[in-house]
Amino acid sequence: MKRSIQIAWPREMDADIAVIGSGAGGAVVAKELAELGYNVVIIEEGRYFTREDFNLNPLESILKMYRQAGQSLAIGTPLFLLPLGCTVGGTTTINSGTCLRMPRRVLKRWQLSYGLTDIDETEMDLLYKAVEEFLFVKRADPETAGKNAQIFLEAAQKMGLSGGWLPRNAKDCEGFGVCAFGCPSDAKQSMNVSYIPAALAAGATLLSRCRAERIIINKDGCATGVSAIALDPSPAEIKIHARIVVLAAGAIYSPYLLLKQKICNSSGQVGRNLHIHPCVSTIAELDRRLDNPKGIPQSSYIDEFAADDIMLEGGTMPPGIHAMNLPLSGRKHRLHMNSYPYTGIFGGMISETGSGGTVTVSPLLKDRPLVRYRFRGADLNKAKFAVSLMAQIWFAAGARKVYTPIAGFSEITGARQLADLERARLKPSDFDALTAYHPMGTCRMGADAKYSVVKSSCESWDVERLYIVDGSIIPTSLGVNPQLTIMALAMRAAGIIDERLQGEARRKLNKPEGRGQT
Ligand SMILES: Cc1cc2nc3c(=O)[nH]c(=O)nc-3n(C[C@H](O)[C@H](O)[C@H](O)COP(=O)(O)OP(=O)(O)OC[C@H]3O[C@@H](n4cnc5c(N)ncnc54)[C@H](O)[C@@H]3O)c2cc1C
Ligand code: SF4
């Protein structure tokens, strides 16, 4: 059953809360506030797809649900492919389902360096727990994990490295291996099958294929609604008047909207501090069958060096996508693809310290931001170490050859080349085009208006009643996949918004403390 609802577009709508974006941040805020009885309108640029639309055809899914057909880029040396979802559920609909809590050391850093002392561990634990329960988060089942993950994890553990099975928001996962292209069995509890249906059941309205263009701000500097364009069947303007506006368009498109409108930027930080968790991947040729993509694409991890900003996580791909990503051509490409069932794939994610990027508005680009990223400093060595570590694990697992994204070391066949790689001093240009999946930081949260875009409550320092609740508020590289943290912070923001509206309602009626009618 399709749950997309918009048929005839009204010109004007009234809401208590207008939420821009239906991804990890927006969907959680919408559901929590709708269930408290508020009139919530969700504005989402992408279409609503359900399991009937997911046909195990990755290319079709990319065209339907990825922004710019999966070709969103961060420009720099190397170039980064930075895929983003543009569909109901946002990037969660096309993600791998890994649900990790942020490490304690990262929260400590937020408290010490960004003054976020009112976000404490006990509160975060409660929020994480609530989200995990709602999304059925549990460790990947080794039975459905697939051989790629099993073989890699076993070899790493034999080498004495710590690791295990990843927690995932998947219920009765059958290991179809296509999480990034829409789960065909609704096992993955992405927002399109979890928080958004719950928000709609609680009375929220979803405007899919509707793009927010501007935040409406009154003369007192308060957000009072959203001006949007309904995209289907032909573009039409629509105004959503609201008491509170929540911007949750993601870490690339939230700053873009603010920069286009020239608001919320008295700190000069909008669009800056972009972190993306650069990823390096290794492809191994083995003598035994791994049978990818059968199994969960991302189900095991090695966290031995997590405190050194390196996390290894599986990430298999269906053959068509694997073929496009191979650093090979011609006969070599054909031979490798002939042995695809014997191919292992694993990825390394870097928590960056020296690197960073920006999101800006460029007159050269129509309807999309310019994203730049500089990969540099200690992060290059971390990436080199991650590649070398993965290659060692693959060799311990019996690999004959390992392909890497590092020039001069694109094919490693043994210990001598590995030793050379370890000694090599790498430049950014030594890396082939890389990928990254976790944009963060471009509207960062902080206790000082001079250096941050939103307060710890997620409200903009500059525009009252405008809250930003998505990956853009995360002030530092997280070190783990961010969706669970974005959701936990969104749940926290929903509580703050409710308290505010309750307080206002009480003051209006001159009533004593306590939750009443809104
Ligand atoms: C392939 C892939 C795999 C990943 N795997 C994992 C994983 O396993 N675990 C994990 O934790 N993270 C993973 N991530 C990252 C994770 O999905 C994101 O960090 C998370 O979804 C970000 O949430 P968000 O709310 O910031 O933005 P999004 O989820 O991207 O949602 C933003 C939404 O806003 C909409 N939007 C943008 N502009 C407008 C506008 N002007 N008007 C209306 N709507 C608008 C977009 O269409 C989008 O739907 C993965 C990402 C990718 C690409
Ligand atoms: S592995 Fe398959 S069944 Fe499991 S969550 Fe991913 S797409 Fe769904």
Image (tube, grey):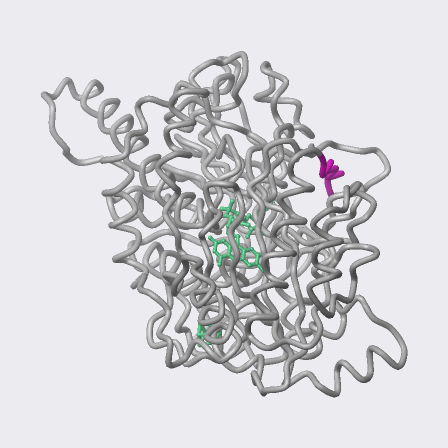
Residue 375 located within the stretch drawn in magenta: yes
The residue lying toward the viewer, choosing from 182 and 401, is 401
Q: Quadrant of the C terminus?
A: top left
Residue 232's x, y, as percent?
64, 59
On whether residue 395 falls in the magenta region, the answer is no
Residue at 58%, 87% (x, y): give it: 289
State the residue at coordinates (32%, 38%).
494
Q: Position of residue 253 (x, y in %)?
A: 62, 41
For residue 481, side relative to residue 63 (left or right)? left
Question: What residue appears at the point 39 percent right and 63 percent down from the top-left corner?
Answer: 164
Relative to 172, is 381 on the left or the right?
A: right
Front residue of this view, candidates 275 and 17: 275
Q: Nearer the viewer, residue 323 or 45?
A: 323
Front residue (pair 246, 417): 417
Q: Is residue 291 above or below residue 492?
A: below
- Residue under the point 54% across and 36% down: 472
Extent of the magenta region: 368-376
Quadrant location, the N terminus: bottom left
